[in-house]
Image: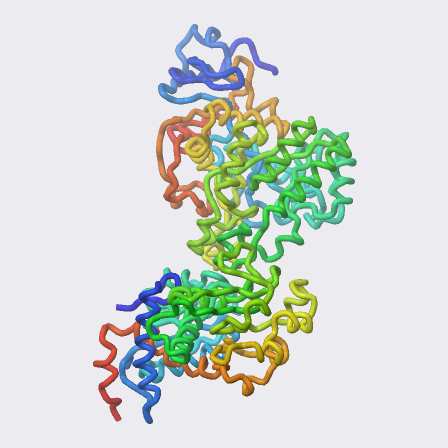
Amino acid sequence: MNQSPTTTGPTIAIVGGTVIDRNGERRADVHVADGHIVDGSTTESGEPDTTIDATGLVVCPGFVDLHTHLREPGREEAETIETGSRAAALGGYTAVVAMPNTDPTQDCVSVVEFVRRQGIAAGLCDVHPSGSITVGRQGTQLTPFAELAAAGVTLFTDDGNGVQNPQLMRRAFEYSKSLGVTLAQHCEVEALTGGAVMHEGDCCSHLGLPGWPSLAEELMVHRDIELVRLTGAPAHFLHLSTAGSVDLVRGAKADGLPITAEATPHHISLTDELLRSYSAIYKVNPPLRTMDDVEAVRAGLADGTIDAIATDHAPHVSESKERPLDQAPPGMVGLETALGVALAHLDMPLVDVIAALSWKPASIARLGDRHGRDIEAGSPANLTIFDPNEDWEVVPALLASKSHNTPFVGVPLRGKVRHTMLNGAFTVLDGKATR
Amino acid sequence: MSRSLLSIDELGADGVMRILDLADTMAEVNRRPNPKVPALRGKTVCSVFFEDSTRTRLSFETAAKRLSADTMTFAVSQSSLNKGESLKDTIETIAAMGIDAFVIRHGSTGAPWLVDDWTNAAVLNAGDGWHSHPTQGLLDAYTVRTCLNRPDGFDGLRVAIVGDIKHSRVARSTTAAFKALGADVTWVAPTTLLPPVVHEHATERLDDIIEDLDVLYLLRMQNERMTEALVPNLREYTTRFGLTPERAKRLSPQCLVMHPGPVNRGVELAVDPSELPGAVINQQVTNGISVRMAVLFDCLSANPDPTSDLERPELP
């Protein structure tokens, strides 16, 4: 890190807070200058230019979302990179992995570069584009992994769809193994989910809706675990939603396989019973499942089987979510509520929740050089400062995301972001975006 | 004041009895030489059918006209839905014309509930997806009540509903209506044609129970179920689940044979209904008018006493 020994730019002191990072929890003031955390003694000669009172607040490495749909290019009516970045910053994120199911798909360097540039222009968080595994997410031809990796792509996924063909997936693992990238799977065997609207179970039976069985996820989790065992390439499982999937991943990790996994805020808090309202706000893919599944996913996070909390932030315009269940698109926004859901619904030590929001996903996305770093001199100043005890409820109209399809209306949330700092500058100050 | 009828569950057992009692009054009207009363004069009922239906739409419109309501039909094929207008915009536009009731059929589960949220008009569910078809459940219950003379309820009544339960809103609503009145309902189908989770009694062996039934309710078997590998072919379906001449002989003489129509002759019903003394398939259609009159009156009339309005003679 090219930290200059003496600081020249404006200095910021964050005082009175509780610092939490990989080293645990401690009372400490944090000093920032020139985009980095600096030793307090180097600025003691003069008063800091800005002092933030963090009394009662937690100061931690910035959050990293492994799973954000920013919709640009192609669906700018639902979200843009700028509005999504603002939502991310307000949720405490300093980096987001942009999912590749854009139009055009993020399957070539030019589109990936466009997304990255738009993120830099917005300046609200690091927008880290992922690439698709197959061209156009069509499941037939591999994307140029090496070219994309050279352009900075570290995570590849056809998210929105799983790669159905096991032979193609095997080739993808084999070909990408040496490139220092990770393939991330949306686990869904589509032959088992045709027309599915919600979880297959009691509720879908009553409502007369085609079901999305847990088996459809678990079969692909199992397949990819075995492909990892065969090829040795790393895999990341997106949005695990079933108790069976958590068990499979737990077993694979016990076998020492290079596997990571994420779970969404909605899969640790909501169940398929909400579909009895007939509201497509609760339609998501994979679907909301049963309380047993919710508890298994929570347990997976608690014991480290699931590494990261990832939002699967999926904005949709209100018109599309007012349609009947089978005609509405799946997805929920989640960037601005993730912390509140996690702290309200997980019975885990605070440091473990922050790990799942920050340094663990940073490591999976291979962003650990800039994000999720310990709070010590020399680290890039990518920080989240939040009140862990504030109880609040989400108001859709007040969301910064261009779309307001949150399922958390009326759900108790705990923990609210006050300030977010990206490279030493506040993107959120006093709960408001600075740009 | 208006209220909606969306499902048997929401109507409840008391509501079912209320509608069936009211249907008796309506049946009396329908037996008159001039079967028309002014009970809903000045009310406008709009049928909005997003799925093809001749029977249910005609039945509702006949019922509305016999109560002197004005009726309109929103024909989806000619509508702006083909131009991409949303369901919500369509409903709000029609509602703005001053509609008192929507009779809606939609291929999507829950669509009538959404419509009910968007409008102050009464919403009558004429079928949504595989989910609910409450007036069918009510007319089936009314048919059993009148044909078997069970005015006080169906305690101990043994009913089998046979066929494609999974994809059938009729099965769900008719089961709910029969059970609300105390009947014992058994679903008869291969596992592939049952919902993933079943709370009813269920069997694949029609022959084990056929002699003990008070009501045999056959569902329509659709050809596309074969392409989805839910049953191998229609011949095997008929062999296992159809009402064949052999099975017809084993029915108790009083057993009603019911079907929501249209019948697939030779598939679920492999005997001539005229040879079945218990067949009441046409009575179901006739009763549908009285039941839908009762539902329209119940949902739209401010007058809690049906007789006062009904007795008033139709003006010339």
Residue A159, above or below A325: above
Residue B23, above or below A80: below
- The x and y percentages for residue A7 are 51, 12
- Which image quadrant is residue A116 in? top right
Count of numbered tags: 0
- The x and y percentages for residue A16 are 38, 15
- The x and y percentages for residue A168 are 76, 44
Q: Residue at x 21, y 81 (%)?
A: B308
Tell me if A265 is positioned left or right of B6 in this view: right
**Colour treatment of the image:** rainbow
Question: Which of the image's four quarters has the N terminus of chain B?
Answer: bottom left
- The x and y percentages for residue A151 are 69, 33
Q: Residue at x 39, y 15 (%)?
A: A15
Residue A298, above or below B86: above
Viewer-nearest residue: B37 or B115 = B37
Viewer-nearest residue: A153 or B174 = B174
Q: Is residue A101 at least partly visible in the picture?
A: no
Q: Residue at x 66, y 40 (%)?
A: A221
Viewer-nearest residue: A100 or A309 = A309
Viewer-nearest residue: A285 or B171 = B171
Tell me if B64 is positioned left or right of A424 in this view: left
Q: Is residue A370 at least partly visible in the picture?
A: yes
Question: Which of the image's four quarters has the C terminus of chain B?
Answer: bottom left
Tell me if B184 is positioned left or right of A221 in this view: left
